[in-house]
Amino acid sequence: MASPLGCLELVHQGPTRQRYRLRSATPLSWTLLQEQLQRHLGGLPLRWRLNRSAASVVLWYQAPDDGHRDGRQTATTTLRQGVQALLAALGGCGAEPPEPAPVQIQTQGQRSTLLAPLHCLLSGLSGGVSLMLVALASALLLLGLAGMMLPLSPGGIVLALAYSLVELALWLRRPFMDGAFTMG
């Protein structure tokens, strides 16, 4: 039997409140679940509410009126215990998690044999131009750094131009690099 943890989907969480959507492969008996929750959550300072139409349960921490101030982690710890009790109640009801949804993976189609040489040629040209732009950006980077040291020289503008050239080189290579990371 699978763990009932797969039956819970956290919909909303606050400092003192959590709402879970209940999903089960088998139909849930709401009256049995209510009885199980009353039995498992009885000793905790938690309030809870079942919503059959939304198939959800809300747990919220209610501080006891004993005159003591609760610590910061009291609500979090109590809600964690409440979720464990909720899991036990779901297990007592015979809830089983639904089958996971299949993941769709899209792959690129095969390139035609006529376009493959053109693609290789464009990729080579793009790579060459990108390397030249990066070399020019490196030279401008050195000039810009030297220009930042000298007073009244346009070092910042030259550095911005070098940055723009590197971005342009990356932009030119991007269409040809998409396929490189998806191939096996």
Image (cartoon, grey):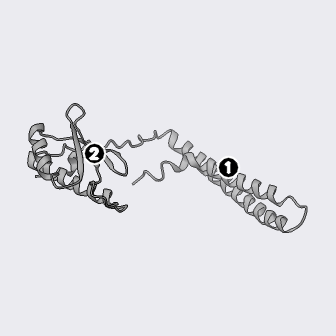
Q: Residue at x 71, y 55 (%)?
A: 163
Q: Is disc 2 in contact with disc 1, using a CB cutoff of under 8 Å? A: no
Task: Label 1: state its secondary structure.
Answer: helix
- Where residue 63 appears, as percent x and y from the top left, is 29, 53
| Relative height, residue 70 to residue 48 (above, below) | below
**Of the residues shown, which amino acid type is indicated by label 1?**
Leu
| Relative height, residue 158 to residue 172 (above, below) | below
Q: Residue at x 78, y 60 (%)?
A: 140
Q: Which residue has dot 2 on it?
A: 9
Please rate how many residues cluster around mark 1, counting C-alpha atoms within 10 Å: few if below 14, some from 14 to 19, many from 20. Answer: some
- Which quadrant holds residue 24? top left
**Of the residues shown, which amino acid type is indicated by label 2?**
Glu
Which quadrant of the rendered structure holds the C terminus?
A: bottom left
Q: Nearer the N terminus, badge 2 or badge 1?
A: 2
Q: Which residue has dot 1 on it?
A: 168
Residue 2 visible, this angle? no
Say left or right for 143 vs 165.
right
- Quick one: 28 or 124, which is closer to the camera? 28
- Where residue 87 appears, as percent x and y from the top left, is 18, 51
Task: Label 2: state its secondary structure.
Answer: strand
Say left or right for 64 vs 130.
left
Q: Residue furthest front?
A: 67
- Quick one: 7 or 139, which is closer to the camera? 7
Say left or right for 132 vs 82.
right
- Where residue 5 appears, as percent x and y from the top left, is 21, 51
Q: Residue at x 67, y 49 (%)?
A: 168
- Where residue 120 appears, as percent x and y from the top left, is 55, 48
